[in-house]
Image: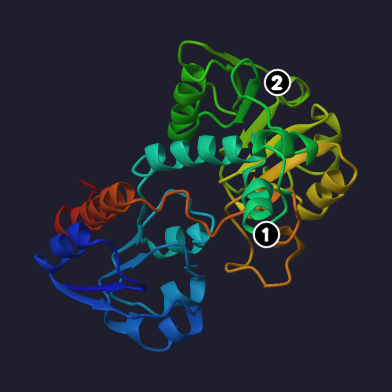
Amino acid sequence: MRILLTEPIAAAGMDLLRAAGEVHVAGVTDPAALAAGPLATADALVVRSSPVTAAMLEAAPRLRVVGRHGAGLDGIDLAAAERLGIPVVSTPGANAESVAEFVLLAALTLARQLPAAVAALAGGGFPAGRSLPSSVVAAGLTGTMLAGRTLGLVGLGAIGRGVAARALGLGMTVLAFDVAAVVPPPGVRLVPLDELLRSSDVVSLHVPQTPQTVGLIGAAALATMRPGALLVNTARAGVVDGSAVLAALDAGRLRGYAVDVFAPEPPAPGDPLLHHPRVLATPHMAAMTHDALDAMAVAVARGVLGYLGKGRSL
């Protein structure tokens, strides 16, 4: 068996794949380059967050399975995969704890105005002869606590539930909206999306990018949100209208925006989201812990090998 990876994954997963067949790391993610050569002899394809197009799948006559090192499948042409009879496996839940921790980190960072405070301290922005705590207040860098505030989760899957558990531990009220008929964990109340947006001090997004969720948080939703609220997006870039977010920030309606996902990735250096003083922009790193990377690598390797060896996922 020949297993093609567009990029390396953690050693725990690579070892499993190498024990089962010949592993080749292409080192490229461009669909045209992959379709032009490496895919022709591949029995399995493993990608991280790069796209899998119909042309790629059609250029791989031996392909028996596609593995996605991560949870979202929006970058994979699922219709083409189904038409060609190629199953697709992913790793839902493997990175949930890592992302959940990051969401709270991002919310706390925004609530306490840490980027501006760190920059002011490093840049000599606090005058001598005055205590630092007094200077922080004078500079308008006083933060807010999350305890006693309301968190709204848009999506209540594995990551959303992980965020909820941590937020409840901080003393927050937790609301959730999900299009699926889910049973919320103790302490979490399901509400309609409009109510969640109106009532939440922090809104965190945990939905896949689908035709139904593209632009979900646009001008209308932002106008519904509580003035001074914070927005955290570790889901997908297309779920949020970036221009509408910038307008809401400039108007003072939205207090801060934490964004870990972009389209395209990486974003252009001139992307205004990267330079706005009340945006915390991070490089798609919410799941980037050694723990989560090991878990995703093992999960995708087992899923791929399950189809190669038994015709089903392990």
Measure how far apart labels 1 and 2 are at the Cα level: 45 Å
Are dots 1 and 2 in contact, CB under 8 Å?
Answer: no
Local SS, label 2:
loop
The residue wearing badge 1 is: 123
**Can you say whether 186 is above or below 108 in the image?**
above
Report the amino acid beneath label 1. Answer: Gly
Question: What percent of the width, then of the height, locates residue 260?
Answer: 57, 52
Quadrant of residue 233 in the image? Answer: top right
Question: What percent of the width, then of the height, locates residue 78?
Answer: 49, 58
**Can you say whether 190 is above or below 261 in the image?**
above
Q: How is the image coloured?
A: rainbow
Report the amino acid beneath label 2. Answer: Pro
**Can you say whether 119 is above or below 61 in the image?**
above
- Disc tally is 2
Could you tell whether 210 is left or right of 28 in the image? right
Residue furthest front as drawn? 129
Q: Is residue 292 visible?
A: yes
Q: Which mark is residue 192?
A: 2
Residue at 45%, 22% in the rendered image? 165
